[in-house]
Amino acid sequence: MRAIVYKSTGSWYSVKDEQGNLYNARIKGVFKIDGITSTNPIAVGDEVEIEMESAGENTAIITEMHDRRNYINRQSPRSKHHHHIVAANLDQSMLIGTLREPRTSQGFIDRFLVACEAYHVPAVVVLNKADVYRKKEMQQYEQWKEMYEDVGYRVLLCSTKEHTGLDEIIALLQGKTTLLSGHSGVGKSSFINYLLPHLNLKTQDVSGWSGKGTHTTTFAEMFDLPAGGRIIDTPGVREFGLVDISRQELSHYFPEMRALLQDCQFNNCLHLEEPGCAIKKALEEGRIYAERYFSYCNIFDSIEEKTY
Ligand code: GDP
Ligand code: ZN
């Protein structure tokens, strides 16, 4: 029987069959998947085959995992060489950020977008707390919207406090499986509570995001939306990693750069100081945003060169 994983808590998984029945499921035996060293072989969003353990009970055994369309990784907190699969089979990923209290940096957004490109997951950016934006933040929003939409990402503005801009976001979620991410304090829990009031997720008080928050270990969880579609909440996952990206391939994950790569003189061009670089030329001519190129350079510097 086919089912989808809604939650994984170590050795137990909450899975839902096609009729909407929930089961507690376990893996039997050793599960090796695509030779990937993962600390969790099965993740939220995975499609699996289950068998009932015994009639009349809601416990099941996971016997097989179907091929993933995509998945998102992060480095395991325990080891650099182990990856932790955050979620699988995503239709899109939504970053919730804000321009105030606490401001999301462009670098953070660009790292998120690069990761989504690398994992082949379409990305959307939502800027929350519009109710507290002054002229300065509104100008920043307009500028980001123009820039990101130019390179292919939707940017939406909302306030979960004043319930503005939310209908358009909800329309984007309908019928899709969407991973929600965002650093602490942006209003992600408030947004999920608006979508699914019965969940009553804990939100932080005003001072909560300012300092050293408690780092509780929590697990990714998927929820059905009333109008169809699902969201995946990833509490505690601030940023999923660029773990598998090399310096050489980074420009492939900037769509506006990807379109120009064949025009560089050298096919191993890193778009830094090389002669005949189409990216640098486009930058000088204003066809590539300086802010995005700046992020490219920063992310480039942060990637450790692999030593084989
Ligand atoms: P999370 O850490 O991303 O889950 O954020 P929370 O939902 O816990 O919200 C963090 C803080 O921001 C709380 O004090 C919320 O009341 C506040 N907040 C959430 N959304 C908004 C908004 O649209 N406007 C304003 N002004 N505050 C908000
Ligand atoms: Zn180049």
Image (cartoon, rainbow, N blue to C red):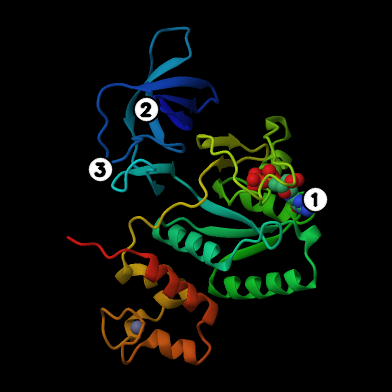
Check disc 3 and report the residue beneath it: 34
Three-letter code, disc 1? His
Check disc 2 and report the residue beneath it: 49
Mark 3 Cα shell of 10 Å, populated few (<14), some (14-19), many (≥20) = few
Above or below residue 180? Residue 219 is above
Three-letter code, disc 3? Asp
Above or below residue 54? Residue 171 is below
Upstream in sequence: badge 3 or badge 2? 3
User: Is 98 displayed left or right of 77 in the figure?
Assistant: right
Task: State the SS at label 1.
Answer: loop
Task: State the SS at label 3.
Answer: loop
Asked if the residue under mark 1 is in contact with the one under mark 3, i.e. CB atoms within 8 Å, the reply is: no
Q: Position of residue 172 (x, y in %)?
A: 63, 53
Q: Which mark is residue 163?
A: 1
User: Is 113 displayed left or right of 187 in the figure?
Assistant: left
Q: Quadrant of the N terminus?
A: top left
- The tally of labels here is 3
Three-letter code, disc 2? Glu
Question: How far is mark 2 from mark 1, CA to CA?
Answer: 40 Å
